[in-house]
Image: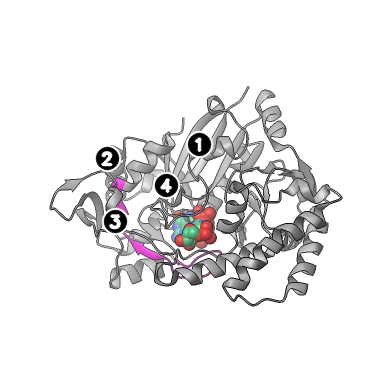
Amino acid sequence: MSKVDVLLGLQWGDEGKGKIVDVLAPKYDVVARFQGGPNAGHTLEFDGIKHVLHQIPSGIFREKTRNIIGNGVVLDPIVFKKEIEGLQKFNLNVKANLYISKKATLIVPTHRLLDQAYEKAKGENKIGSTLKGIGPSYQDKIGRQGLRVGDILADNFKDKFKKLTDIHFEILNKHQIEFNWNELEAQFNDAVNFLRQFQLVDSEYVINKEITSGSTILAEGAQGSLLDIDFGSYPFVTSSNTVTAGACTGLGVAPRHIGEVYGIFKAYSTRVGSGPFPTELLDEQGEKLRKEGNEFGSTTGRPRRCGWIDIPSLKYSIMINGVTQLLMMKADVLSIFPTIRVCTQYQLKDGSVTEALPYEMIHEKIVPVYKEMKGWNVSLKGIDEKSLPAELVQYVSFLEQQLGVPITLISTGPDRTQTILRNQR
Ligand code: GDP
Ligand code: IMO
Ligand code: MG
């Protein structure tokens, strides 16, 4: 029997999950995605190549790793086909190394249009969705009218598809959304035919067999804990459970089979889309962070909002996820600052301070309480654990002391090789 390790983002997504899954993949026989869909953009860099994955697990570049798209994922066949075509130049054995759950929910073209319609209707209160059809497809899943990957193998798939899209057309008409259905339908049918060639399986059996036979397994989270449908800053969240528990329901893995929980975070904070962000820097410093960290969305290209690290929200994510190891990303980006700020508490409207995430943070402005620290202010190029600047070691020690979990990895650049492992167990 083996355990399933989980790697997930502790902030608002884009923490660097793709890079680290790729770094860790040689240690794992299996990498599995358990939630989310094409809203994710996971970037991998190695041998001078930069590649962004959306729905395919980040273990795909490692020859011996088997990859699973679990039942908790919402899969867009059109995006999937494009992703597979984009991988062709790497000569990977994708068909042999990728398993897709028959129980994963299908994103149909009208889901993307509905996303647009709902966001437009929200006006100023829009979520800032990636418009990939995530919310509407999960709505259909929960509403028990969704289509699943396994349905594409049935003779009556066309009827089912028509029945669902007819429901969507009615809503789209009300919202006066225009589209060329013939084109979208043809594109979808073509992509569904393409998807049929892959290994469509009951992935809960596949993964549990791997557990029984002692394989090493890593579950790859998408988005981040602060975007979780239950625990994030609702309604400015995504539509799935992005936390550790989501790996159980999104793969069919029992809680007792969960092993290490790697919590990944940036040495600062970013958020893309709307919603509360207590430590956001709306000044020149935020601009500097965005530029130095190249903080533009991997899926939509939108500029990411940037700010200092936020201890109360990290503590919250660590609590909900049961994090056992912390991985700190993008330490190199903070090299530009002579002084760095760490938010240790929040000050509320009534003047009181707290370390907890208040329910009211959606509506009320929170003032972060900062501790100022001396920055390392030197390049981290080519650095190893022994040559880490003292101020960076102090920063890491302070975070460990505040968060109560060891930081076992420091990332100093986007490439696979720019990774420092510490105190490995
Ligand atoms: P994910 O969604 O969590 O996989 O993260 P993204 O790929 O959306 O965004 C992370 C971005 O940071 C990507 O462009 C990565 O190449 C880059 N990146 C990852 N780790 C580091 C790092 O340590 N330093 C720097 N400068 N960039 C990094
Ligand atoms: P990865 O896996 C960052 C954000 C969107 C929006 C909200 C809802 O690359 O970390 P949705 O499209 O799900 O309806 O959008 O969630 N969002 C992400 N932000 N990284 C992601 O994924 C995200 N996926 C969704 O910007 O605010
Ligand atoms: Mg991303």
User: Which is closer to the viewer, label 3 or label 1?
Assistant: 1
Q: Identify the residue at image location x=61%, y=34%.
A: 217
At mark 4, the secondary structure is loop
Quickly name the residue at label 1.
245
List the residue tagged with mark 4: 10
**N-terminal label among 3 and 1:** 1
Residue type at the position of mark 4: Leu
For numbered disc 1, what is the local secondary structure?
helix
Residue lying furthest right in this view?
Answer: 155
Alpha-carbon span between mark 3 and mark 1: 37 Å
Eye-nearest disc, 1 or 4: 1
Q: Residues within 10 Å of mark 1 (few under 14, many from 20)?
A: some
Residue interval drawn in magenta: 294-312
The numbered mark, 4 or 2, whose residue comes first in the sequence reads 4
Is residue 25 located in the magenta-colored stretch of the structure? no
Please give the name of the residue rendered at 14% of the width and 48% of the height, measured from the top-left corner: 352
The residue shown at (48%, 56%) is 14
Mark 2 lies on a secondary structure that is helix
Q: Is residue 310 magenta?
A: yes
Q: Which residue is mark 3?
A: 376
Left or right of residue 264, residue 195 in this image = right
Q: Earlier in the sequence, mark 2 or mark 3?
A: 3
Q: CA distance from mark 1 to mark 2?
A: 24 Å
- The residue type indicated by label 1 comes to Ala
